Structure formats: structure tokens, C-alpha cells
Image (tube, helix red, strand yellow):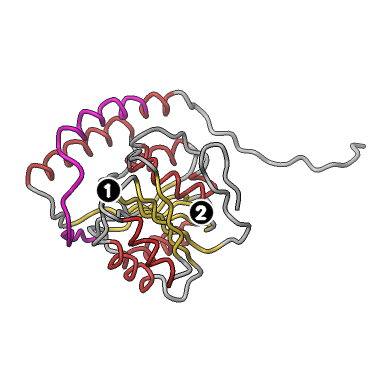
Amino acid sequence: MTKTGEGIFQPASECLEVTVVVPAKDERDNLPILLDEIAAALDGRRFEVIVVDDGSGDGTDAVLADYAAGHPWLRPFRHAASCGQSCAVRTGVLNARGAVVATIDGDGENDPAYIPQLLDALERGGPGVALAAGQRLGRKASLAKRYASRFANRLRGWMLQDRTRDSGCGLKAVRREVFLRLPYFDSWHRFLPALVIREGYDIVHVDVIDRHRRHGTSKYGIFDRALIGVSDLLGVWWLRRRRRRVPQVSAIAAGRRD
């Protein structure tokens, strides 16, 4: 494996069924439990897990190094300084060896037991479906966060027409070849349904049950997320309007014309 100028390692040629990408910041106590759950959920499948430590200061990197020593399916990476969740997801996607990339938050609030359901929904959809997105039920966030999220989701759905009730759920499964085509920006992970539709693909949804985090506290507040989200929402709205038609491409066979 070789390191490029952007500090990204090129994946080996081996192709797996699925790569699970876990962005994590200061989740030292949650990750070993979560990794055990992911392995149990994907038992019998050819998979790998990429955890991207986004500049943690709590020893997350040491926990990942110890865990990887006994679990060869884990490939941990680390950002020298925190670059944000979207950047951590992108690092995982660029290094993934799976035909499908499944994402899940590192705090343990997402249940890995739903990952096989996402993979099955994506497979049933056929090649025209590129994203299976989790839709949270029974959220455990505070009442204020739930109301703020509900308003943001309704506004996003009205502006982007992405047919998604809850785009903020960390549980998603995306065909890697499509993932790599999506325009990147910070907070990009919150707009994946709209960006996938922009590429001409369909999406499907799977209802999932939210859980309480076991350790630590949330890294996000209500107002910081809302202020950033407005500019991102306008940017994605602009991106969708600037692509009026997705080309239908077919190869031209060589041969003589009579």
C-alpha cells in the first residue's frame, strides 16, 4: 500500500462484499463494543471495518491499535487533527475495498444489527438503486433536538425533494462506485440522498430504532449544526439545479458499416 500526497492510502485490489466505515472522535469506550456488534451482524459475509479516528485526544487510536491486533478485518486510520465527520467518512470511502460502503456512527447510537437489512434492501433494488438509508424511529435525543431535527428535515425535503424523512441517520449503505462520484464538501454526509438522486440513481429506506449512547456525550449542539446546515442546504439545492440531465451512456461497438 502506498501513501499519496493527500495522505490517503490506496486500497489493495481485493474486493469484499461490504466495507463498514465508522467515523469516530473521542469514542474510546464505545468502539470495542460497537466493533464486536458489527462483526456479529456481518457474520458469514466478506467484510472489513474501517474506523477513522478524527483527531481524538482520549486514546482512541491506542484502543483501535490493540483491537486490530486480534481482528484482521479492522483497518484503523487516524487524522492528525480533527477534520469533521464528513471528512472521516470520505477517508473511509477512499480506502474501502468493499463493493458497498455502509456507514455507522461511532457513538453506538446506531445499531449494527440493521446493516444486513440495508445491504439486502440495496440488493433487492437492483443496479438502479445506489443508496439504502436508515430512517430513525424512537429517537433518544432531547426534545429540543428532536424538534430542531424535524424542522430541518422538512425544510430539506421541501427544497431538495430527496424523498427522505431523516437524512441525518448515520446508518446507510451506498454502492462505492457511486459514492466516489459525489461532490465532496464538509457536512456532505447529511445530504447523501439528494446527491445520489442527482447522479441519476434511486434510493430506498429502512426503518431503524435509535439507541442511547453508552459512554461520553454528543459532539453536536442544536445551533452550531443549524447554522452550518443552512449554507450547505443552499449549496446542495444549487448543485441539483445545475445538473438538468443525467446522460444515459452506451458503448459503440467497433465494426464496418455497410
Residue 252's spot in the image, x, y percent? 77, 40
Which amino acid, by three-letter code, is at mark 1? Gly
Residue 137 in picture, x, y percent from top left: 19, 56
Can you tell which quarter of the image residue 76 is in? bottom left
Image: 91 above or below 155: below
Left or right: residue 82 compared with residue 43: left
Q: Residues within 10 Å of mark 2 (few under 14, many from 20)?
A: many
Q: Residue at x 58, y 49 (%)?
A: 10
- Report which residue position mark 2 lands on: 96
Residue 217, above or below 121: above
The quarter in which the C terminus is drawn is top right
Residue occupying the point 47% across, 38% down:
182
Mark 1: few/some/many CA within 10 Å (<14, 14-19, 20+) = some
Instruction: Please report whichever mark, 1 or 2, sits nearer to the chain's N-terminal start.
Output: 1
Report the residue marked by disc 1.
57
Q: Quadrant of residue 33?
A: bottom left
Q: Along the line of sight, which residue is nearer the eye, 208 or 37? A: 37
What is the CA distance from the residue labelled 1 to the residue labelled 2?
A: 25 Å
Residue 142 included in the magenta stretch of the image: no
* SS state under label 1: loop
Q: Amino acid at mark 2?
A: Ala
* Residue depicted at 8% across the width and 48% down the height: 142
**How many marks are shown on the rendered structure?**
2
> x%, y% of residue 132?
39, 54
Residue stretch in magenta:
208-235
Depth order, front residue of 95/249: 95
